[in-house]
Image (tube, rainbow, N blue to C red):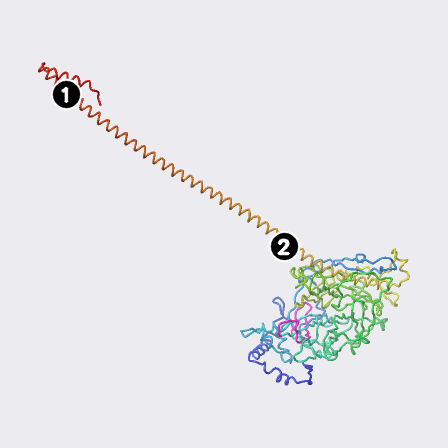
Amino acid sequence: MPFAHISEKGPLSVNQILSNKMRPFLTRRILIACTSLLVLSLLFHHSYYLREHDPLISSRVDLSPHLEPEGGKNYEGRGLFKPLWIDGYDNTGIPGGEYLGRNLSCPSLAHSAQIGVQDSFFLHDNFLEIAGELDSHPMIDYVPAIAKLGDGPFTLDKMLDSSWDRLATACIWMPDHNVHLCVSRIIFHPGGRKDRCRISFLRGQIYSESWIHLDRYKLKWKDQEITFPKVFDTDTEFKLGGALYGPEDARIIIEEGVDDAEPVVVFNMITSHSDWKRAMWVFRPFSEQSRILTVRGTERPKKEKNWAPFFVRELEGASNATLQRQPSTYIHFIWRFEPLTVLKCHLSTGMCDVVFEQAVLPALSSQHDDHDGSLRGGTQLVPIPLSKLKRDSPFGSPNVQAFVSFPRTHVEKAGGCRQAVYRPELAVLVTNTTHFYLTYASEALDFSEGIVMDAAALADPCGKGRIMITNSIARWDLNGRDSNGKPMDVMTLSLSVDDATVQVLMVAGIWDLLRGLPSLATYFEQKKVDTIDGFPAVSDVGDSEYSPLLEPFAPYERANAVGWDVRACLEESALRYVNARVDSVKQAQEKEKELQRIKAEQEKKKAEEEKKKAEEENKKAEDDKKMAEEEKKKAEDDKKKTEEENKKAAQHADEDKKKADAKKVQEQKALEEKVAQEKKKAEDNKKVEEDPKKEPDDKAQHVTDKTPAA
């Protein structure tokens, strides 16, 4: 792969660059890392992409359309489609303005319809393989990455993760090859931050109809055989030590109805061709031809981006629909949406002309709120078929052409977000090759919770849910089927979230939604429109109360004026979307805060009640303790009293006993004395009997008998 290198002293060869600039950094660690990288790249070249449940597919497998199951492909093999209501604004052709004495309100354009959405899935890439393929590029060195990892051990995966990323994958379906071609921006940022990208590369990959990556797939185009995956040569220029080189924000488009058409890739890039300003380029991926785009008669701005590409079928040769359609030499772009401005660019020279710039008649102009939101390019614009049936001319007359796309709104200063919020919308553009207007636009889409973003991301529109961008309409299959065999049109989108993912989303029912738009009724009913009189597609105002007032104005002027309102209503709704999401977050936070406050109060009250209860229990315990102590003291006093009483009783008993004993002793003594006296008396009486003359003794005895007992 050749490298375009620019320096102040002139171009240097790769060997000189490596010798003079990089040799001091080629440490042993870097050499080991690079060697490991190359070896592992070869070892894992095949295996990285394949899912555990997917069969191995190579380029030798027959992918021809005749293998398609009869009746169309079943798109519910990955899961059922979930219903989703889309609110939007449909062009009525009845404007407001001073002339009509009214300001057109967005609700008067309101339209709602239901589609189906399926859970998105992720596409991954092999950074080991990418790093191995680009290892010889002069801008690739891992010194900053290794320095950031420090002096300790590190793995090759860590070094690659901190150095490489993939962004903005855009895909198209190539019906002649029955495969998807995807292009991605590969960025090298050895410092670890994506916003400090050193250089970007454009990488192409081939996926099967079922989104299985086809490794080493050989695509045959004309007399060439091109092997995918590959990094394209995009004429990138760079300066060593600089940054932000290479292609960015790639979009891809293929021209409908052209056999074996070569896709066109559109990206922006800084080079010396634009005086190092960021300019738009077109690139042909098979012939690898690059052209910088230049808008004639204008000064190139510092930054060009967000151009939405589409192919307009020219009037020349349109009368013979049986002729094989030849590739266009021109490509159109929506340059900006306010005012709607369209460029027509020559694919070979890159010269562009402004072929349309919207101007609304002041008499038909309505006022809308000022805001910091704008509609910008997202996907390519795809022509809307008149029927789901395949015919020689499925898109009708070139005099009335309609295109569908998913642009995106860029909303700043909404909801207090510090950075802009991005959301896709569904939009329809109508043209007769010279005049253009918007006929429909939906409100901001996030495809509902869990489809693309999880609940946490959707609830954080100022943070990780800030960016959702649709990068391409990869395919629009009008002959799909659901799991029951019911017909359904399925549009496949590639999109990214937070500039960090590559996701594929399938949406069912877009054609049915468009077919039901009143503004496109005339478009779908056309058989053949030979003149510009059939334009625009918006139905006549008919019996509207404003019909007499609108008669002086051409149908296009009316549709054009309302087209301005459609875009303004879309932008206002995007602002409301962000504010509503932020308000929901704030309300949820306030609700959570209130719940926390209530919970805290309840817990505080509970704690106070528990404290009070504990205090009461403690007081009761203290009272019980005091009572117990009093009872104990009383018991002790009673015991002491009892003991004293017992002691006193014992003392009394002892005294009584002593008294009783003393009394008993006295009584015994008295008895003994009495007995002794009686004995003596008896003896004396006996002596008297024996000797009657002893009277004094009797007298003495008589005195003794009269002595009281003790």
Answer with left or right where residue 532 lies relative to residue 667.
Answer: right
Name the kind of residue labelled 2 in the image. Lys
Q: Position of residue 177 (x, y in %)?
A: 72, 72
Magenta run includes residue 462: no
Q: Which residue is mark 2?
A: 593
Question: Which of the pair 699/347 is nearer the observer?
Answer: 699
Residue under numbered circle 1: 679
Q: Residue furthest top?
A: 692
Which of the 4 image quadrants contains residue 584? bottom right
* Above-or-below relation of 261 to 659: below
- Can residue 114 be seen here? yes
Report x, y in % for residue 163. 62, 73
Pointer 2: residues within 10 angstroms few (<14), some, or many (20+)? few
Density class for disc 1 (Cα within 10 Å; few <14, some 14-19, many ≥20) is: few
Is there any visible trace of residue 71 in the rendered image? no
Q: Earlier in the sequence, mark 2 or mark 1?
A: 2
User: Where's residue 708, x and y in %?
Assistant: 21, 20
Q: Secondary structure at mark 1?
A: helix
Q: Is residue 199 magenta?
A: yes
Region rendered in magenta: 190-215
- Along the viewing direction, whichever of 92 and 561 lies nearer the viewer: 561
Q: The N terminus lies in which quarter of the figure?
A: bottom right
Q: Is residue 589 above or below residue 684?
A: below
Label 2: which secondary element:
helix
Residue type at tag 1: Lys
Of 167 and 622, nearer the camera is 622
Per the rendering, the mark at residue 109 is none
- Rendered location of residue 455, percent (x, y): 65, 59
The image quarter containing residue 256 is bottom right
